[in-house]
Amino acid sequence: MLEFFFLFMIVAAGTGGELCVSRAMKVVGEVHDFRPAALVRFVFRAMRVGWMWIGVAMMSLAFFSLLAMLSIENVSFVVPVTALSYAAGAVGAMLFLHERISRQRWLGVFIVCIGVTLVWLSRR
Amino acid sequence: MIFGMKNSPGLHLKTYVLILFIVLFAPLGNVLLSKGMKGVGSAKNWVPSELFHILVSIISSGYIWLGIACLLTFFVAYMLVLTWADYSYVQPASSFSYAVVAMLGYFLLGEAVPPLRWVGIFIICVGVFIVGHTHPRTTERA
């Protein structure tokens, strides 16, 4: 049961965090200048966006959930099942960022879900 | 051909080296985190004092810091390679990480990896490969 909770936190908080950071990046705008000073200015600009902080907080939560899950399960089990993030990411991007998800991407997500199910079933 | 990349042998070599970094350092980081967390142990009662003790153990674990260093190396390599190579090239290539993490778990940590898990991991790699081969931009440019 605890594994379900931690997996949910890794996938939901991790994907939610990435979506928030992605939204923040779209507010900040595309990077054209890769010189160090410009990158520092870019980071400071990003830190002024609220979505960025929400994203970092959620990603931190996902990281600690990953640590908690690694303390009770094997890494060869934990990391593959977190691939479920691809499904959460596709759904989240469609609903939250209003992105169009192609049929091919849905097919890939479906195949990932089959793989995750098999890995989950292989649990001792 | 890697779309969006200049077709020079030096750039290809740089790309392959960084993808090798991505495929090795992300799984290695997770394996080190796993090793560190097995040493720290899991919470039993989930009371604040126990969680604080675990947090102190995590912060003082060398394996955890090494794992974080590996994940940071992976992240920098990933960001760097994306500055010249296409996401649709890098992401499928990095899908091998799932197989590498199982191999490292098996060889370095002595984990039992049943055949069903290997099949599942292979299918995940195929799925990620397909996801990565879709167009990275799904919205119109503003």
Image (cartoon, coloured by chain):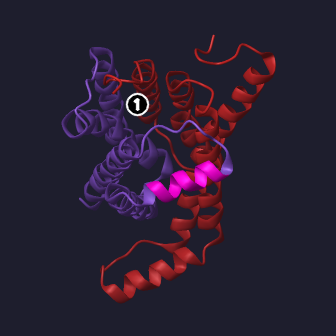
- Which portion, as a residue range, is magenta? A37-45
Q: Kindly identify the residue that appears in the image at 61 percent across and 33 percent down.
A: B83
Q: Observer-nearest residue: A23 or B112?
A: A23
Q: Observer-nearest residue: A108 or B112?
A: A108
Q: In which quarter of the image is residue A59?
A: bottom left
Residue highlighted by disc 1: B120
Q: In which quarter of the image is residue B51?
A: bottom left
Shade representing chain A: purple
What x and y, as percent, mark residue A102?
28, 18
For mark 1, name the chain: B
Shade representing chain B: red
Q: How packed is label 1: few (under 14 Cα within 10 Å), some, or many (20 or more)?
A: many
Q: Kindly identify the residue that appears in the image at 58 percent across and 14 percent down.
A: B3
Q: Is residue B41 above or below residue B88?
A: below
Considering every residue shown, the one lying at the far top of the view is B1
Q: Observer-nearest residue: A74 or B64?
A: B64
Whether residue B66 appears in magenta in the rendering, the answer is: no
Considering every residue shown, the one lying at the far right of the view is B10
Q: In this view, does B41 lie above or below B16?
A: below
Q: Is residue B71 visible?
A: no
Considering every residue shown, the one lying at the far left of the view is A95
Decide whether the magenta segment is chiefly helix, strand or loop.
helix
What x and y, as percent, mark residue B22?
62, 39
